Amino acid sequence: MDANDRGGGTSMQMNTLSHRRRSAAVDREHDDGGETMHDSSRGFSHDLPARDRRQHQQHEQQFNSHHQNQHSQHHQHQHHQSDTSEVFDHAERIASSTAEEEEKEIKEESDSIFSDAYYDMDPYVPFPEEHHLPEEENVLTIRAVFIGCLLGGLVNASNVYLGLRTGWTFSANMFGAIFGFAFLKFCSKTFAENFPILGGTFGPKENAIAQTAATAAGGFGGIFVSAIPAMYQLNLLSKNPVDDFGRLITFCIVSAYYGLFFATPLRKFFIIYVARELRLIFPTATATAMTIRSMHAIGSNATATAKLKTRALAGTFFTSLAWRVASQYAPGILWDWHIFLWFFQWSGYSNAAIDIDNWGWVIEWTPAFIGTGLLVGLNPAISFFGGSVLSWGIIGPALVHVGICHGVQLEEYKDDPKWSRVMSFSSFKLDDAKNHPSPRYWLLWPGVLLMIATSFTELGVQYKLIWHAFKCAWRAIALGTNDFARKRGKNIKFLERSERISTDDYYVEDIADEDEQVAMWMWGPPLAVCVVVTCMILGLQYHLNVGMSILAIFLGFIFAFLAIQCNGATDITPLTTAAKATQLILGGATSGSGYSKDVSQKLNLIGGAIASGAAGQATDLVVDFRVGFLLRAPPRQQWMAQAIGSMVAIFIAPGMFILFTKAYPCVIDLHADNCQFSAPSVAAWRAVAIAVTDPTFPVPTTSAIFAVIFAFCGVFSVILRHYYLIGHREKYRIYVPNFMAVGLAFVLPQTVYGTAMLMGAMIAYVWAKKWPVSFDTYCYAVAAGGIAGEGMGGVVNALFQIAGIAGQDGRGWAAGCPYGLMC
């Protein structure tokens, strides 16, 4: 956490893999948890025995020297990114967990996956073939696709729950890889070799297919925690989402397969043609591939570690699921601790502790966000918590104190002498929002603008790399066009000059045979059909004209290109930037066109969802291709797994959204005073849509002024980090706040998530320092299990709510909850 700006519609998501702090020997943190990747120069090699550490350092020096010679002509790009080997080592550290005890020699070199050849890897060539593994031919098996889709479906459902609560969603890459390994291993051991469907041995390639299907099936939750709920809150769709199920499905279909089809040829471009030249490592993909490879490595250590990871993941998943379900029946004891309210009650309902509780300062035992804290490190966790303190502990109360903002006294407690001081400061039910805002409405605008400005600046500082990527794209087009012309006996001299490339420096061999590639007929004609169908659906069901539809589709392609390139270089997928940029462009295109405000807002939100959804889908596919490239999996079979998994996501994502809106109608009710789903991403999308389409500009003046100043601080921090805190000053980057996390805290009216994330980060810090080997083995598995488990527990709770057997239906215990009611 893509804090990852990863995706699909979230205000900010984290790519959890890119921000893990890996060992006790690392003396400093990664810089700011998601904006760029800058690993310590110390690190993984210090966890190795002395002999292996010396070998690793020698190989690293050789690789760096070779790399610098190859890329000296591109020195102007190097200050934007960490060294290739540094990023590759970062991914290596994420995947590695084979040492049994710290500071002990590995007794048998054959038992370790870290051989000399392993250290000396070129990150742009596939892993060496493992001769001890069974030969894999048709790896697109029913069992692999089935378990992948099942695991992805679990992540998808979890993401809708987590996204509506907090704005964060998570990728299924590693979850699918580890759980997929466990399932396939069980099948291979339990069933005979020739047993239909379930039987037979398996290897890394089939494991890659399972994680590919999981990633695809786990996608598309993003638009259902952002643009789509925003449309319902603005009354732009039907009152009941069930009535819109058909058009929600068709919208998902065109977004999913448009992204799938146009991303298919980008495999060649980003993984083969320009990977070495642009230094595209795709750290999460590389980490996933390394994890799969390590679990299949020969030797007792690798087998034991794979079992430990699987058991830890399964144990925390089911424990978190059970905890979330059980907590609804005793929420004041198992879930939310209203400590300051308890002090207020113990004082005889007389002290000021209730004022702190009114501002949301509660401890929540959420496995998902404690798990997130395990993964992201101290910098983003402190930034997120600090943003909560700044917004809901300092600025908000100050605004109320001076009379700029106003709270709402809850009518049901107005005449109760014990609870007459209960106030709500997060209401959107306002008669004059511009002149008499609530603190939540006032704080919304600085948070949104800060996130937009920071994400745009992060993209902007990569301008040289982006420009070079576009030049590489033109060269690839020239190469393909001229090859096509030569086959017909012609040669285009203009294109011939453009296609020249130094293959000695940048050549990456594609090990996939021609019959293993995705043929052009499989994606070219379907892409054309998909574009036409997209325009028809957007016109008939959402009233976008053809011009606006084509503009949204074009923006989806452009931002997908940028998102994939940024993901490969920095592990950040800037979908927040893509979404907000699309909204701003469409807002400009509709201004003065005579559209009504409602129509303009619908165009804005749907167009943004198309662009960000397609870009997210395309990025997931290319990341999966990178995993398959390293593991030598056939791209055609990966592509088919992606297509099948996408079909699963098309039905699960809208289905989960309808489930939650039925169980908790407040999700799409803008004027609901109390709702456990605060949906910060929805608020951000809605705010941008209103700002660019409402001629009255309904932003409080003081909020607008502060938003501009605050956004400048975020822009300055990015520039400072990229251009000044380099070289010998790079060590100070850890002290620069993550302004994306700070901005999200302003948008999110609950402080519990920042508190929980900080708890998790502090646990991880101590764990990594004291027990680094245990941390390497269990950290991701424990965190991922907690995240997915709570998400599935939320789904179960929604079903219980609909069935009338939830804790809030008189079946729970209100002990510890405020006002004597279920919390």
Image: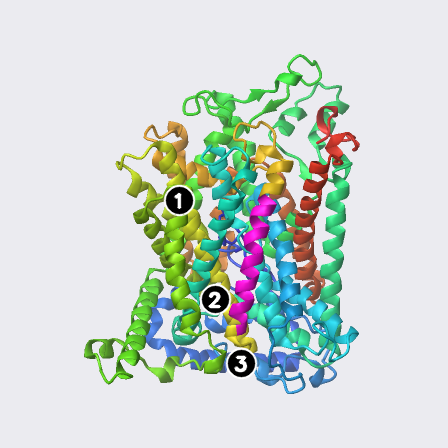
Sequence order check, earlier mark of 1 and 3: 3
Disc 2 element: helix
Task: Examine the residues drawn in magenta and state their main secondary structure.
Answer: helix
Q: Is residue 396 visible?
A: yes
Instruction: Tell me: 613 left or right of 783.
Output: left
Residue at label 1?
Answer: 540
Q: Can residue 41 be seen in this view?
A: no
Instruction: Tell me: 98 left or right of 443.
Output: right
Quarter where residue 275 is shown: bottom left
Q: Residue at the spot x=72%, y=24% of the render?
A: 819
Span of residues in magenta: 637-657
Residue at label 3?
Answer: 121
Q: Which colour style is shown?
A: rainbow
Q: Is residue 496 above or below residue 643?
A: below
Residue 115's disc number: none
Residue 622's disc number: 2
Looking at numbered disc 2 in the image, what kind of residue is underneath it? Val
Looking at numbered disc 3 in the image, what kind of residue is underneath it? Met
Q: Magenta stretch containing residue 377, yes or no?
A: no
Q: How crowded is mark 1: few (under 14 residues within 10 Å), some or many (20 or more)?
A: few
